[in-house]
Amino acid sequence: MAQIGDEVKNKQVVFRDYVSGFPKESDFIITSSTIRLKLPQASNAVLLKILYLSCDPYMRMLMESRSAPNSYSPGSLLHGFGVAKVLESAHSDFNEGELVWGILKWEEYSVVEEPGKLFKIHHTDVPLSYYTGILGMPGITAYFGFHDICSPKKGEYVFVSAASGAVGQLVGQLAKLMGCYVVGSAGSKEKIELLKNKFGFDEVFNYKEERDLDAALKRCFPEGIDIYFENVGGKTLDAVLLNMRPHGRIAVCGMISQYNLDQMEGVHNLLHLVLQRIRMEGFSAPDYFHLYANFLEAMLPYIKEGKIKYVEDTVHGLESGPAALIGLFSGRNIGKQVVAISTE
Amino acid sequence: MAQIGDEVKNKQVVFRDYVSGFPKESDFIITSSTIRLKLPQASNAVLLKILYLSCDPYMRMLMESRSAPNSYSPGSLLHGFGVAKVLESAHSDFNEGELVWGILKWEEYSVVEEPGKLFKIHHTDVPLSYYTGILGMPGITAYFGFHDICSPKKGEYVFVSAASGAVGQLVGQLAKLMGCYVVGSAGSKEKIELLKNKFGFDEVFNYKEERDLDAALKRCFPEGIDIYFENVGGKTLDAVLLNMRPHGRIAVCGMISQYNLDQMEGVHNLLHLVLQRIRMEGFSAPDYFHLYANFLEAMLPYIKEGKIKYVEDTVHGLESGPAALIGLFSGRNIGKQVVAISTE
Ligand SMILES: NC(=O)c1ccc[n+]([C@@H]2O[C@H](COP(=O)([O-])OP(=O)(O)OC[C@H]3O[C@@H](n4cnc5c(N)ncnc54)[C@H](OP(=O)(O)O)[C@@H]3O)[C@@H](O)[C@H]2O)c1
Ligand SMILES: NC(=O)c1ccc[n+]([C@@H]2O[C@H](COP(=O)([O-])OP(=O)(O)OC[C@H]3O[C@@H](n4cnc5c(N)ncnc54)[C@H](OP(=O)(O)O)[C@@H]3O)[C@@H](O)[C@H]2O)c1
């Protein structure tokens, strides 16, 4: 095992250049540099060993030049959520050996100059990778997106798209715990089975096999939809709008079907917002990060009592990262897409 | 003046048949029948003399076969909001000589079998036609749509489309009273001048003369938009979405630019709901009718103190009704479109 002071190899993933259309593996470069495991004096930094990196759909938006100045810089390292162990700390809040999650660079060892935004991990009786998913950003997204934005009530009819994913599988299970009737859509037979048999969705459909999404929704929701947890956008949203019940709510979490398009598809049925008096609301996980302690208090018992299950899809090694990341946009991942970097 | 028991002429407007595309005058038939001014015994009805009828954009939706069973029945009388005087009442809640507003048929004299949904008019020190506008359905729409759905705060940036209309002129003035910065768009020079000089909008533009709505909004809102009061839909909504500030609100009141289209235009920029965490919410005036007393308490003083002005566009006689109604969709009306039937 590498020691403080050692000079070690450090694999990294470099973002080559702005992307248009679907990202390809060649949009990323795997490089191998070296790093001395020693913090400069008089810094506030921490030196981390990365354990897990997370593949999240929002990363696609940072690959656009039009997202500048927030986008990834061509030639610079990719970054995203991840879990790491503190090897050395020059920051008074962090100590060697502690575990953290937060935004990290895609490399094996990493110096974080301003570690103030990292969350400390106190609960280690769950898989550490969970802090990229159910106990990390996607978990916060599902929990607050559902409870705060959807205003759910027992017995309501809930639809979740991209339902087997990092966020969707949680929303479905939270809705079931709330006593809702829950329908999910996903893009493969295997995912559909997972929804029914593992996560307890009441009804499911494979959107790729439905010629008419409106008809599929009418079949699953003869009474209409009270809550739509929107992960995909485009045609699915248009079909949902036709099936909303009065005073329904649409939590706009994301629109993954649109992220790789140069011009986003038009949504035609927005007049139904008036006809049915619907609230449609976008939200963003970081707005809820200050409530992380409350979130853990709710979520940890669900995990420990087996009331919520979490499925991950793990690839190994940084060099597998780019393919896993771009796989999100073809539905390659079954559950939360994780890149395991090191188990130490 | 006609007396109870007389048989009198009764002009009526008949809805010919379902409409597609823009409605035409020939979609309505002016007929003249006779009516005996006497209620049948043992009824609960009231006999009304109609004073004012209101032209409202929602009436276009009732001309569609796809709105059935709520649409107008081909061959039957048109109906809409209006103001009337009670000539005779068989209903214990209503007395001869009282004034009412509510949904009425488009005719000169009318028997309302179930008058329970009519509102009584107690305040007659304002023009009675106001009960089709500022003190009727459009007023309720503006007041609750703005205060309840937009959650306005002093100093916020507010945009109103169809700003000189029945609803829009009120929203703009309510927003000014709230201390907001208010921009309105409308479709003619005359309307634009009204917005600036009569209603006190801070900034205005003629959307028909702007080649690039996004640029027009950026010019009027260098800091972006907090609140959009949506009356028109389509391209305006798409441009607004690009200019919303974080945590902005869009009250979806209506989308008049879409009512005459067979397929509604696609809206492409909904992803901004997530990026800026925007709430977009449809609402409907009748949901607030139970709060009518509170509404009057707020609105009457504004009128009497001259804090809110109201512009009406009045045509005379039932036979002028159809042209006035369809004129809403070409912007013929300047202010609230009223049809004056009788002044007695
Ligand atoms: N607002 C926030 O703060 C926030 C936070 C986290 C995530 N999000 C959003 O939430 C959504 C889900 O994220 P996640 O992390 O849970 O991802 P995920 O569902 O684990 O992975 C993405 C999945 O999206 C589906 N997909 C890909 N392309 C699609 C298309 N064209 N049409 C329909 N489905 C498609 C695929 O599943 P199928 O096989 O079912 O197609 C794929 O597996 C995304 O839109 C993401 O941007 C928002
Ligand atoms: N949710 C509810 O309960 C409720 C209640 C009342 C009204 N509404 C809605 O509120 C909106 C305004 O109603 P209102 O009664 O105040 O009508 P209004 O503004 O008095 O009259 C309609 C105006 O719409 C504008 N217009 C027509 N076609 C247009 C187009 N293609 N693009 C842009 N503007 C167009 C015209 O003005 P320009 O000259 O400026 O184009 C026209 O004068 C409508 O969408 C209506 O359906 C909703």
Image (tube, coloured by chain):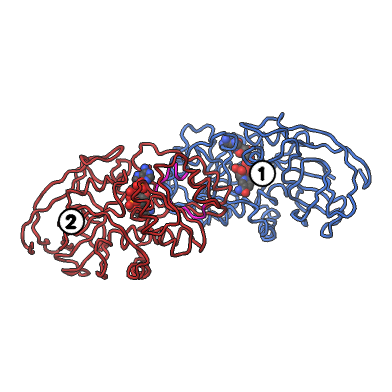
Chain colours: A red, B blue
Quarter placement of the C terminus of chain A: bottom left
Q: Secondary structure at mark 2?
A: loop
User: For the residue marked with disc 2, what is the amino acid?
Assistant: Ile
Q: Position of residue B236 (x, y in %)?
A: 50, 39
- Does B266 appear in magenta? no
Q: In the picture provided, is B304 more to the left or to the right than A138?
A: right
Disc 1 crowd, CA 10 A, few/some/many (<14, 14-19, 20+): few
Q: Which residue is mark 2?
A: A341
Q: Position of residue A267 (x, y in %)?
A: 47, 41
User: For the residue marked with disc 1, what is the amino acid?
Assistant: Pro
Magenta span covers which residues? A225-238
Kindly identify the residue that appears in the image at 49 percent across and 44 percent down. Answer: A239
Q: In the picture provided, is A78 more to the left or to the right than B139?
A: left
Circle number at residue B69: 1
Which chain is disc 1 placed on?
B
Kindly identify the residue that appears in the image at 18 percent across and 64 percent down. Answer: A85
Q: In the picture provided, is A317 more to the left or to the right than B150?
A: left
Q: What is the residue that sits farthest to the left in this orientation? A: A6
- Does A235 appear in magenta? yes
